[in-house]
Amino acid sequence: MFLNRLPLAEKEAFIRLAHYVADVDDDFSPKEQHIIDKYCMEMQIDDTEYSRDSFDLVSVLSVFEEESHKRIVLLEIMALIFSDGDFHQSEEAVLNQIVEHFGLNPNLVIVYKEWARGILALYVQGEALVHL
């Protein structure tokens, strides 16, 4: 929804982060892949290869410098986390690492969580309307 505002280097970093978050609970669901595909379309970039072994969370997060871009990342990652209807402890741990690394207020997680759930519900409703 807001990812088109990021410069190319941040878009590429975001896709790597999205793959990591989708895979962190050892259950990379088709719904999560669908969301990542949508992210790529929105940002007009190709999906990237992902390897858990070579992924470095700190170096990926360090790409994001602007405060508004960090908030965009948090919003969009929240949508990805809730896309499969499950909030695993490992996803929560990564979310906390992101918030801490970015120096964001931890209370944003509560607000962003509700936004993500709401936007995903609207997306499901929209998909249903398309297929009526």
Image (cartoon, rainbow, N blue to C red):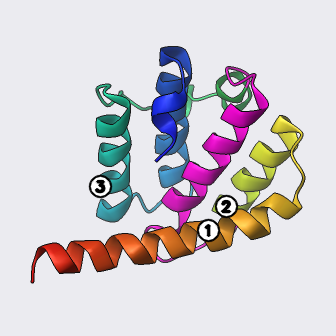
Q: Is residue 15 visible?
A: no
Residue assigned mark 3: 34
Could you tell me which secondary element the residue under label 2 belongs to? helix
Query: How far is the residue under mark 2 from the one under mark 1?
Result: 21 Å
Going by the numbered disc 3, the residue's amino acid type is His
Residue assigned mark 2: 90
Between disc 2 and disc 3, the foreground one is: 3
Residue assigned mark 1: 115
Going by the numbered disc 1, the residue's amino acid type is Trp
Residue 72: x and y in percent read 63, 42
Between disc 1 and disc 3, the foreground one is: 1
Please count the marks in the image: 3
Going by the numbered disc 2, the residue's amino acid type is Ser
Q: Is residue 15 left or right of residue 41?
A: right
Residue 27: x and y in percent read 44, 63
Query: Which circle's residue, 2 or 3, is located before the other in the chain?
Result: 3
Q: Is residue 1 visible?
A: yes
| Front-lying residue, 27 or 1 | 1
Query: Which circle's residue, 2 or 1, is located before the other in the chain?
Result: 2
Q: Is residue 32 left or right of residue 110?
A: left
Query: How far is the residue under mark 2 from the one under mark 3?
Result: 21 Å
The residue drawn where x is 52% and y is 60% is: 79
Residue 63: x and y in percent read 67, 20
Could you tell me which secondary element the residue under label 1 belongs to? helix
In the rendered image, which quarter is residue 62 located in? top right
Q: Which residues are magenta?
A: 62-90
